[in-house]
Amino acid sequence: MLALADEFTLPVTGTYLVGPPGTDGQSVTVLDLSVAGAVGAFLILSALFHLLVSAPFVFKRYLTGLTQHRNVFRWVEYSLSSSLMIVVIAQLCGITDVAALIAIAGVNASMIFFGWLQEKYHEPGDGGFLPFALGCVAGVVPWLAILVYVLAPGSTSGAEPPAFVYAIVISLFAFFNVFALVQWLQYRPVGRFRDYLVGERTYIALSFIAKSALAWQVFAGTLTA
């Protein structure tokens, strides 16, 4: 994919004060983010973590964690890869401000960390859902920002995002919510998800499908010459 992609970039911008607050600032391009590089990065991150977990000295700890209904490696990897994914989605929708992108990534990472806390402090069926609920609140914030840019309230240009951007937003929003649904099913617990390993296998499959879906949609929409 990286070999076939073009050099398409998206700007990361900043607007700095040059006078009193409230006056027009100086808008600069802080950097040009390589979309192919960003897509490759979250795919490589996921692959590296799977490779790490497969190492003999780490795999034993991974198995021990599963018996305790925990997977630390999952949450660390998701905090990095999904935060990069949401930044790419936000940029494709027109969000370029460096502060906004940092905030979006940070809030997304906090959502993942709340999921980690759900596993750390609660057992399936114990009725505790506070970390999960707080994670849901945090998780919706980046999507609200993205929705504003997709709907563009107040815009008079009549311009709309291309169709592939709508497809990315809808499909990845669905995938992000299914991840939350899996944890809810585990901790309710419901049906086959009473077995923690069913949830673990579902997370692995979802991670692969969601990352692949975003990568190929971005590739088809922006990275083909």
Image (cartoon, helix red, strand yellow):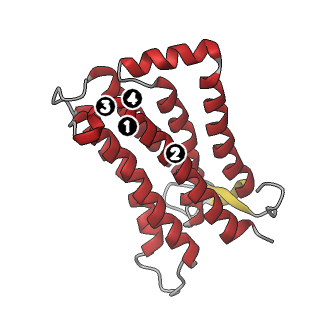
* Horizontal arrangement in the rendering, residue 26 relative to residue 146 (left or right): right
Query: Is residue 24 visible in the rendered structure shown here?
Result: yes
* Residue at the disc numbered 4: 116
State how far apart marks 4 and 2 are (Cα): 16 Å
- Relative to residue 79, is residue 24 depicted above or below? below
Q: Which residue sits furthest right?
A: 3
Q: Are marks 3 and 2 in contact (CB under 8 Å)?
A: no
Q: Residue at x 44, y 66 (%)?
A: 170
Q: Label 2 neighbourhood size at 10 Å, few (<14), some (14-19), many (20+)?
A: many
* Residue at the disc numbered 1: 199
Q: How many marks?
A: 4
Circle nearer the N terminus (4, 2):
4
* Horizontal arrangement in the rendering, residue 171 relative to residue 44 (left or right): left
Circle nearer the N terminus (2, 1):
1
Residue 9 spot, x, y in % from top left: 74, 61
Of badges 2 and 1, nearer the viewer stands 1
User: Which amino acid, by three-letter code, is at mark 1?
Assistant: Gly
Q: Are marks 3 and 1 in contact (CB under 8 Å)?
A: yes
What element does badge 1 sit on?
helix
Of badges 4 and 1, nearer the viewer stands 1
State how far apart marks 3 and 2 are (Cα): 19 Å
State how far apart marks 4 and 3 are (Cα): 18 Å
Query: Is residue 110 visible in the rendered structure shown here?
Result: no
**Observer-nearest residue: 178 or 23?**
178
- The N terminus lies in quadrant: bottom right
Circle nearer the N terminus (3, 2):
3
* Residue at the disc numbered 3: 195
Q: Residue at x 74, y 50 (%)?
A: 37
* Horizontal arrangement in the rendering, residue 220 relative to residue 171 (left or right): right
User: Which amino acid, by three-letter code, is at mark 4?
Assistant: Trp
